[in-house]
Every structure is written in structure tokens, then in C-alpha cells.
Image (cartoon, helix red, strand yellow):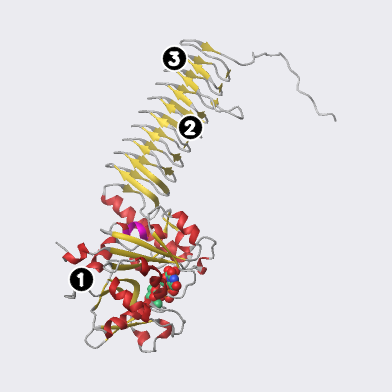
Amino acid sequence: MSQPSSSIDLPLAIVTLAAGKGSRMKSDLPKVLHPLAGKPMLQHVLDSASQLAGARQYVVIGHGAEQVQAAMTQDVCWVMQSQQQGTGHAVAQAMPEVPDDAVVLVLYGDVPLISTSTLSALLAETHASAEQTGGLALLTIELADATGYGRIVRDDSGNIQAIVEHKDATQEQRTIREVNTGILAVAASHLKRWLPLLSDSNVQGEYYLTDIVALAVAEGTAVRAIHPQYGHEVQGVNDRLQLAGLERVFQRQQADELMRLGVALADPARLDIRGSLTVGQDVSIDVGCIFEGDVVLGDGVSIGPYCVIRNSQLAASTQVEAYCHLDDAAVAQTCTIGPYARLRPGAELADGAKVGNFCEVKKSRIGAGSKVNHLSYIGNADVGVGVNIGAGTITCNYDGVNKATTRIGDNAFIGSNSALVAPVEIGANTTIGAGSVIVREVTDQQLAIARGKQRNIDGWQRPQKKS
Ligand code: UD1
Ligand code: CA
């Protein structure tokens, strides 16, 4: 379906209001920076808006302005509003920067789940009229309890006449259930004419953006309203309860999408994705897992309960058992990890490697089929193929100042409770006796034992308590 040509030709100016304090969050962090699924609310808005073709973004900031600017990655035009004199005043601050021929879309930094498709529909609505410049399009919604919201006042034929704020509304107007979400789209040329006409003579002493509706009606400009696809898209966040509510909505949407892709989720309500999770076929995820940053799970990967996996790739058929923590790790096929394993940045596991309980691997490569099964620390190490690392083995990679490397050749067998003092090389097919402290090279095929000799004393009398 093709859109009216005017909406393609006109530049789009997206003005996002983010100057408010957000006192009810009871936080030093500016409200729009509070994270939803690990990403600031304002970033969600900018990301959704940036998918609209031809968009230039303007963000109106005030409280915590520097902090907000520093936290955003997008290239936006920042507009200062040093005193918050109302939504009309806020939009007016951006207008000098907005080209006269643009369509303006007004969004809010604390309404994070607005979807690109609803915004597209709203923009199309501004051009639904025959007028050259287009009409005013509002996003409205019907609420069972409309307390606090601006009400959409319509005449007997259903034409929109005005928006009346709750505090300014009559008892009769307060019975109206259709409310203003605040999100609207209109030609910049109209706004530039209407905004200077706003007055602050109302209960709150603010310049209300909503008063442009009556101005549009007065001069015969078409005013239309559409509803969002979902109610949560227009839900604002004023306190931490509302933020937590939207977090669950967002997480559930992500869980549903994963299940549609064929992922087996033990419980879609107990999953948190704070970033992007890319999955192959027949992936299964048990309860309580958290995925952060960019995570890729290959075909048939299974993740046990209560794992935290950040910026990692796991290839096909790898199994992660309960309570593992993976950060910046690359894991090949058919590996087994955990339970209770920790892979730190730079951990690389080749096909079929095993890292078991209470093991930590950092900046190390574990060769194909090698096992680090119990209570070990492997850091700055290069471990060959088919190596067995006994329980409690430690690579002593740090002398207090520098990190040094441990190299272990193919098919080496490291006895339990060994300390490998780096830098050190251990050849292929070597054997290290349990409890050894290895400080110098062991070459291929050698056995190295470096521990005190055992002494047995016959008939040893233990000390006795004096009576
Ligand atoms: C506004 C609407 C109301 C609507 C409601 C939906 C107006 C006058 N009223 O009311 O019709 O039902 O949203 O939630 O627009 N902001 C600034 N600078 C300002 C004032 C506000 O950046 O000077 C930002 C705030 O940070 C906030 C947003 O704009 O994120 C909305 O402002 P707020 O004062 O909360 O408007 P509401 O009273 O909720
Ligand atoms: Ca509000």
C-alpha cells in the first residue's frame, strides 16, 4: 500500500519532550534515563522514532540536561528548556530549529513503548485530509479511569472540539473516557502559527500544547484521532511502579517473540532480555535467566535455570547447566558448562570442551574436548586438545603487577590441586603429579612432580589433654 505522496516528500521533525524532573521516581537519575530492559527510556523512544523515514530528531531537555545528553548515542538536536512552563512551551523551544515545511511529531521521553507502526499510522492521518498542509492528528485512548488525563471533547456529530485538562475540566467533562495520550502530529507551519497564541491562564499556569486543538478547530483545520495498537504503547512512567509494570510488558513481548521463533521457554514470565538475543532452532531456556547485550544461541542450545549470559556466542548443541555466569565468551559446539561455572571476558571454548562446577575461565582458550571439571581457575592460558585439568588446578597468572601466560599442550594430564606458575609451558602428552607447583617448562611426554616427599612415622602419639 502506498502512502499519500506528501508524507514521503515532507521532512519529519520528531520533537521528544524530556525536560521534566520526575520527582516521583525519588531518584538522582533524570527520569528519562531510568532503564527499561537495560536501556534508558528515552533511548527506546529515539530508537523507535529513528525507524521512521526521513526523521530528524529534536529532544527538549531541562532537568539533568548534561547527564541526558551524555547518555544518548543518537545524533539528535538538543533543545534547552531551562524552565518547565508546560508542554506547549516545551515544543515552542524546538520550533526555531524545525524547517517550515516539516511535519512535527511530538513524543515523550517517559512514554517508552510507543511503536513505529502506531507512529506511521498517526503520520498518515495528518494527510488524510485534502488540505495542502494536512490536519492535526492526535493519538487518543479510552480509559476506564481517566483521572488526571486531558479529555477529548467532541461535539454531537463526534467531531473533536478541544482537549480539556483534568484540572480545568467541568464535572461533566470529567465523565469523558477518551483521553489525550499527548502524542500528536501536525504540520510545522500550523504549529509555528498556533504556539505563540497559547496562554497560561489555566489552573496550572502552564502553556498547554493541548490548547492547539481548539485553535485548529477555530480556523477550520481538520482534527482527527486514532488509537494505538496496544494500550501500553502510550503508558507514561511517573514512578517506579509504572516503570516495573512496563518492564514486564516489554519482557513478555520479547518472550512471546522467542516462542514464535521456536524457543522452548520453561516460563515466559521468568525471563529477562536486556539487549538482543539471537536464536537458532530448538533452543531451550529454563527459568530465571538474564541475557544482556548481544547474545547468540545456536541450534539446540539449552540454558539451565538462573544463568546470566552477556555478550556471548554459544554454538549448536552446547549445554549450560544451572547458575552459570558468562560474560564476553565464545563457546563452540557441543560444549558443557556448569553448573556454577563462570566464563569471563576472552574465554574461548572449542568443540566439545567442558567447564564444570566452581570453575572460572578468563582470557583463555580451551581446546576441543578438553575438560576443566572442578574448582579450577584458568586465566591467560592456552589449553590444547584433549587436555584434562584436575580438580583445583590454578594458573598463577598474576605476580601482583603483570599477567603472564600458561601454555598446555595437547593431551596433557594435570593432576589435581596443581599450581601452574606463569609464564610456563607444559608440553603435549605430559603428566603433572597432583599437588605440584610447576614453575618451569615441562617438555613433551614428561612426568613432572613438584611436591614435598611423604614421610610416615610409626606409632605416633597425639598430644593428650592434661587432667
Ligand atoms: C499531558 C497532557 C494531557 C495528557 C497527558 C498524558 C498537556 C497540557 N497535557 O498532561 O492532556 O492526557 O499528558 O500523559 O500537554 N514536559 C517538558 N517540559 C514542560 C512540561 C512537560 O518537557 O515544560 C514533559 C514532561 O517531562 C513529561 C511530559 O512533557 O514527560 C508531559 O508533561 P506533564 O506535565 O506530565 O503533562 P501531564 O500533566 O501529564
Ligand atoms: Ca504526565
Asked if residue 434 is positioned above or below residue 353 in the image, the reply reads above
Looking at the picture, which amino acid does disc 1 mark?
His
Q: Main secondary structure of the magenta part?
A: helix
- The Cα–Cα distance between marks 3 and 1, rounded to whole angstroms, is 74 Å
C-beta proximity under 8 Å, tags 2 and 3: no
Instruction: Check residue 46 for magenta coloring.
Output: yes
Asked if residue 225 is positioned above or below residue 415 in the image, the reply reads below
- The Cα–Cα distance between marks 2 and 3, rounded to whole angstroms, is 21 Å
Secondary structure of the residue carrying tag 3 is: loop
Q: Considering only order in the chain, which callout, 1 or 3, is on the residue closer to the N terminus?
A: 1
Quarter where residue 129 is shown? bottom left
Name the side, left or right, on which 446 lies relative to 51: right
Q: Give the residue at x 39% y 89%.
A: 171
Q: Nearer the viewer, residue 2 or 379?
A: 2
Looking at the picture, which amino acid does disc 2 mark?
Val
Asked if residue 230 is positioned above or below residue 202 in the image, the reply reads above
C-beta proximity under 8 Å, tags 2 and 1: no
Q: Give the residue at x 43% y 21%.
A: 387
The magenta segment is 45-49
Q: Which residue is mark 2?
A: 361
Q: Residue 428 bears which disc, if any?
A: 3
Secondary structure of the residue carrying tag 1 is: loop
Pointer 2: residues within 10 angstroms few (<14), some, or many (20+)?
Answer: many
Residue 213 appears at what percent x and percent y? 31, 80
Secondary structure of the residue carrying tag 2 is: strand
Residue 309 appears at what percent x and percent y? 42, 43
